[in-house]
């Protein structure tokens, strides 16, 4: 009996040791934790006394890591390294659940008709953003500053409304959903006739833009019947969507419109200059352009 008990204990020790070496769960009915390659292991240990806020969120992965195939964003399109082009459009939805059954059926039929008409893939992207009340707050402040005959009670009411809006926004996470259509198209280079690389590039961009724009207009025309507005996103609009994707929490303070107003999206950094200096630079640019035209005519 002692020998059997000894053998069982030795076997159990060998089993536990082998499971640890193989990094498998000791209990066979426990599932092994999956390790996703490229994703760093998270440390879930929290410091003592540290409080977790519902507004806290993990930092988004870098753009190059998530979209390694993106070459550039230009001409209101996202261009990939394999010459696939992507165009985006924002959709303003109708309030479906406030409609009666007949109106809902009409919207369903229109949407199904649009889907039946297309023979290319269309992706739907939903983006949740923190609600931003900066614009209505700025409007209230502007009215309070411009009105000279505003009574003290009205001014106090406006100030309390601003404070209530700020407290409501900061009290807990509140979101709004933006809806986008994403359409891809890859033109065949062999079907494009061009004399040189520059002409090929120009025709490639034109073909991709014309085809994607036609697809967006098809969606706009069809979904308009269901009171859903489809609006093409420009290059800046695509940049705004990506900005909110990677800076969802920071975008509350550092808004995209402020970045645009401060010309941080400009290709060149400029400073305030006098009118004489600007006129001088424009004159030099015109002279260079004239010289270039004269050289072309001479050749």
Image (spheres, grey):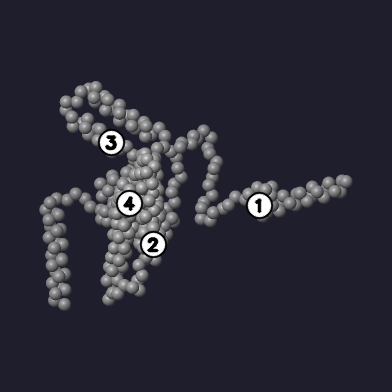
Disc 3 designates what residue? 136
Front: mark 3 or 4: 4
Q: Mark 1 and mark 4: span between their CA atoms? A: 53 Å
| Sooner in the amino-acid sequence: mark 4 or mark 2 | 2
Front: mark 1 or 3: 3
| Sooner in the amino-acid sequence: mark 3 or mark 4 | 3
Say which of 213 and 43 sits in front.
213
Q: Mark 3 and mark 4: span between their CA atoms? A: 30 Å
Q: Is residue 71 visible?
A: no
Quarter of the image containing the C terminus? Answer: bottom left
Q: Mark 1 and mark 3: span between their CA atoms? A: 57 Å
Query: x, y (%) of residue 167?
Result: 36, 31
Query: x, y (%) of residue 38?
Result: 51, 55
| Sooner in the amino-acid sequence: mark 2 or mark 3 | 2
| Sooner in the amino-acid sequence: mark 1 or mark 4 | 1
Disc 2 designates what residue? 119
Disc 4 designates what residue? 223
Query: x, y (%) of residue 178?
Result: 36, 46
Q: Are marks 4 and 2 in contact (CB under 8 Å)?
A: no
Front: mark 1 or 4: 4
Front: mark 1 or 2: 2
| In the image: residue 97, left or right of residue 209 | right
Q: Mark 4 and mark 2: span between their CA atoms? A: 17 Å
Residue at 43% over, 38% down: 55
Query: x, y (%) of residue 94?
Result: 34, 44
Residue at 21% over, 32% down: 143
Q: Mark 2 and mark 3: span between their CA atoms? A: 43 Å
Residue at 79% over, 47% down: 9
| Sooner in the amino-acid sequence: mark 1 or mark 3 | 1
């Amino acid at each position: 009996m002692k020998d059997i008990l000894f053998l069982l204990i030795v076997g159990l020790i060998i089993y536990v040791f082998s499971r640890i070496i193989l990094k498998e769960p000791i209990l066979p009915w426990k599932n092994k934790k999956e390790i996703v390659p490229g994703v760093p292991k998270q440390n879930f240990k929290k410091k003592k006394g540290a409080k977790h806020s519902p507004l806290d969120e993990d930092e988004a992965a870098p753009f190059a890591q998530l979209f390694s195939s993106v070459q550039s964003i230009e001409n209101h399109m996202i261009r990939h390294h394999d010459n696939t082009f992507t165009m985006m459009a924002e959709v303003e939805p109708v309030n479906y659940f406030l409609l009666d059954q007949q109106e809902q059926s009409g919207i369903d039929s229109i949407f199904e008709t649009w889907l039946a008409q297309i023979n290319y893939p269309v992706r739907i992207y939903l983006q949740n953003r923190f609600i931003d009340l900066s614009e209505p707050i700025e409007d209230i402040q502007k009215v309070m500053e411009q009105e000279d005959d505003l009574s003290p009670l009205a001014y106090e009411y406006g100030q309390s409304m601003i404070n209530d809006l700020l407290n409501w926004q900061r009290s807990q996470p509140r979101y709004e959903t933006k809806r986008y259509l994403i359409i891809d198209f890859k033109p065949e280079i062999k079907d494009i006739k061009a004399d040189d690389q520059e002409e090929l590039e120009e025709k490639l961009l034109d073909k991709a833009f014309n085809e994607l724009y036609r697809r967006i207009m098809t969606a706009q025309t069809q979904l308009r019947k269901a009171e859903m507005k489809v609006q093409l996103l420009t290059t800046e609009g695509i940049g705004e969507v990506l900005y909110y994707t990677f800076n969802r929490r920071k975008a509350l303070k550092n808004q995209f419109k402020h970045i645009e107003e401060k010309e941080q999206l400009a290709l060149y950094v400029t400073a305030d200059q006098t009118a004489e200096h600007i006129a001088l630079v424009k004159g030099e640019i015109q002279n260079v352009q004239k010289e270039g035209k004269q050289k072309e005519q001479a050749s």
